[in-house]
Image (spheres, rainbow, N blue to C red):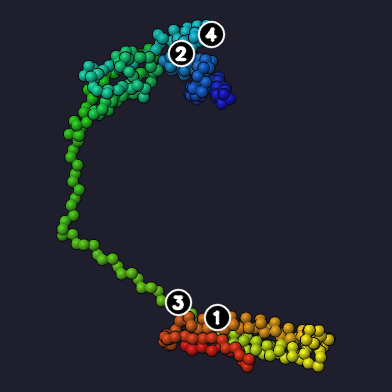
Amino acid sequence: MAAAQSLFEQAVEEMDRKQYASACPKLEQTTQMLPEALGAKETLARCYEAQGRLASAWAQYGLVNALASRAGQTQRAAAAGRKAAALKPKLATLTVELPDAVRGLSGISIASDGLALGAAVWGTALAVDKGEHVIEAKAPGYRPWSSKVAIGEDGAHARVEVPMLETLEEEEEAAPPPTPAPVMSASVPPPPPAPAPAPAPAPAARPWQRPVGIAATVAGAAGLGATGVLVALAVGKKNASNQDGHCDALNTCDETGLELRAQARGFGNGATATLVVGSLLAAGGVVLLVTAPPGKDRPATTGAIRWGIDVSPARVGVQGAW
């Protein structure tokens, strides 16, 4: 309701500015949204009349006259009737004639500007707005036909006769035969073989990998060696704390025992750290050595690769074979 009212008000403002080309479509939309609104229909009739579409205005005034009479709005009905009567002598007309042969076609349909014309109005002068109109004729099994008719002024009378439609068979016979597609000769050589795939690129040279692997392995071995030393120091400090009564069986210690136990824990923590770091360095170094590409003057080696970490009370080290 609100949208229809807004459209109506916009259309009225545009009519006041004589912008009928945009005002009339808004009023058409309003009458579709509010089919019972006689005021909108009457305003649309005035818009058509101002735009020069006399046949559309005449039809709209006639509709308002009929609906207003039915609703008991006698004054509005009378005013619309007078408007329609005044426009009728000025109307242009268009008559669509169909010969008997065309009328007898099964399923024949006629349209004017896209609106179907029933058999009852064939041969009847119909009120139309001035301008160009398109008449179409269709029937199953026949080629569609259309024609344009221009009506240049109000009050003009035009006539169109629909010719006999052409059958689809006649159209197909008149069409030239399709050109056959060229056939490839047997002498045409076969297509060349697909090129062989390019060889896989050689692995990129990494001259730095072997020296880094050796350095990491040596550093890892040194770390593991330091682990053994720190473990020995930690054990020695703990044993010293247990001597001379510095700590008893319940680990109750005097000041000297506490100092020795703290030193033992420090050496133990250091041993743990050097064990982890040394193991990682040693393992990483071995991986770098194993995966290093061969140099220009050194052939690639083959065979089994073995390596490991040797930890014992006397020593910690890395050993392997390539």
Circle 3 residue: 204
Circle 4 residue: 73
Q: Is residue 45 left or right of residue 246?
A: left
Classed neighbour count for the residue bearing mark 2: other residues with Cα under 10 Å, few (<14), some (14–19), many (≥20): many
Mark 3 or mark 1, earlier in chain? 3
Return the residue nearer the eye: 153 or 116.
116
Mark 1 or mark 4, earlier in chain? 4
Mark 2 or mark 4, earlier in chain? 2
Above or below residue 304? Residue 65 is above
Real-space CA distance between mark 1 and mark 4, rounded to the nearest whole angstrom: 103 Å
Choose mark 2 or mark 3, whichever is in front. Answer: 2
Choose mark 1 or mark 4, whichever is in front. Answer: 1
Residue 291 seen: yes
Mark 4 or mark 3, earlier in chain? 4
Q: Which residue in the rendered view is the most extreme toward the right?
A: 255
SS state under label 1: helix
Circle 2 residue: 63
User: Amino acid type of disc 3?
Assistant: Ala
Image marks 3 and 1: residues in contact by CB distance under 8 Å? no
